[in-house]
Image (spheres, coloured by chain):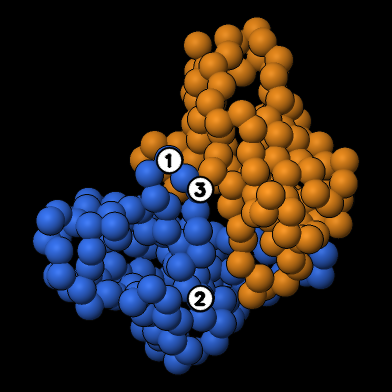
Chain colours: A blue, B orange
């Protein structure tokens, strides 16, 4: 079945440091890939997505490129802020049978702590 | 109100109680989901409703009973739960389709005593 593997955290960084969170996936078809972020006490929010190979998703200074050859979708940010402290989830979605919802497979999440 | 709203935010219940979690979405979506988030475990998809029909039930114990009376509302009815059911229960909604992102509520933190 489909699976998503993320690096385990916690990842602790200083402000303005470079952040990379690795994500690799296993899927039988051509999945869409997502990064979600969860701030303390809240639900998950979509951070960015990519729907086909070589697509780059970007939002709020974060970027991730869909690499089919390495089955990866690593998340990067060039200069993190304290407000980026959160748990980050990589997820994939396979092509769905019509009217069957959009069932995401999530990675285990990576906690990021940014210190001033 | 906009987005996905879940109530209550926190719930403590005994193993013999019956309670319900409520989710409401104001996004015009036609699919809704229940996820369970436990400490140190990946998010677990519990149920999916699409166009008000249940299309996924991931081997969830019968002590969890979902209900989707219309496309904007989703309930999770709970009865005779176990302590290991304590978790954050997240509701989400989306449009149909592989590329449609899920929009999550803030969750209900459930503690079973």
Mark toward the start of the polypeptide (3 vs 2): 3
**Same chain letter for marks 3 and 2:** yes
SS type, badge 3: loop
The tag on residue A41 is 1
The answer to whether residue A4 is seen in the rendering is no
Task: Please state, as top left, top right, bottom left or bottom right, where the C terminus of chain A lies in the image.
Answer: bottom left
Between B15 and A87, the residue placed more toward the observer is: A87
What's the distance in space between the residues labelled 1 and 3, CA to CA?
Answer: 7 Å
SS type, badge 1: loop
> Would you call the spot at circle 1 few (<14 residues within 10 Å), some (14-19), or many (20 or more)?
few
Q: Position of residue A63 (x, y in %)?
A: 36, 79
In this rendering, the label closer to the viewer, 3 or 2:
3
Residue at point 50% right, 21% down? Answer: B111
**Which quadrant of the figure has residue B82?**
top right
The tag on residue A49 is 2
Q: Answer with left or right where residue B99 lies relative to residue A53.
A: right
Q: Answer with left or right where residue A8 lies relative to residue B43.
A: left
Q: Is residue A37 above or below residue B4?
A: below
Mark toward the start of the polypeptide (1 vs 2): 1
Q: Position of residue A15 (x, y in %)?
A: 15, 64
The answer to whether residue B94 is seen in the rendering is yes
């Amino acid at each position: 079945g489909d699976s998503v593997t993320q690096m385990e955290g916690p990842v602790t960084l200083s402000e303005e440091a470079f952040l990379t969170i690795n994500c690799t996936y296993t899927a039988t078809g051509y999945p869409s890939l997502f990064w979600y972020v969860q701030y303390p006490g809240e639900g998950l929010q979509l951070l960015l997505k990519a729907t086909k190979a070589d697509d780059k998703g970007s939002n709020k200074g974060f970027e991730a490129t869909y690499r089919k050859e390495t089955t990866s979708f690593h998340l990067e940010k060039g200069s993190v802020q304290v407000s980026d402290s959160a748990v980050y989830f990589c997820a994939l979605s396979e092509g769905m049978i019509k009217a069957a919802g959009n069932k995401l497979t999530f990675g285990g999440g990576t906690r990021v702590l940014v210190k001033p | 109100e906009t987005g996905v709203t879940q109530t209550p935010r926190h719930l403590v219940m005994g193993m013999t109680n019956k309670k319900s979690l409520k989710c409401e979405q104001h996004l015009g979506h036609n699919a809704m989901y229940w996820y369970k988030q436990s400490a140190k475990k990946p998010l677990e998809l519990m149920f999916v409703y699409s166009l008000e029909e249940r299309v996924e039930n991931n081997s969830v114990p019968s002590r969890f009973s979902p209900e989707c009376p219309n496309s904007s509302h989703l309930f999770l009815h709970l009865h005779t739960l176990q302590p290991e059911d304590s978790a954050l229960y997240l509701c989400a909604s989306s449009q149909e389709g592989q590329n449609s992102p899920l929009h999550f509520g803030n969750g209900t933190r459930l503690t079973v005593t």
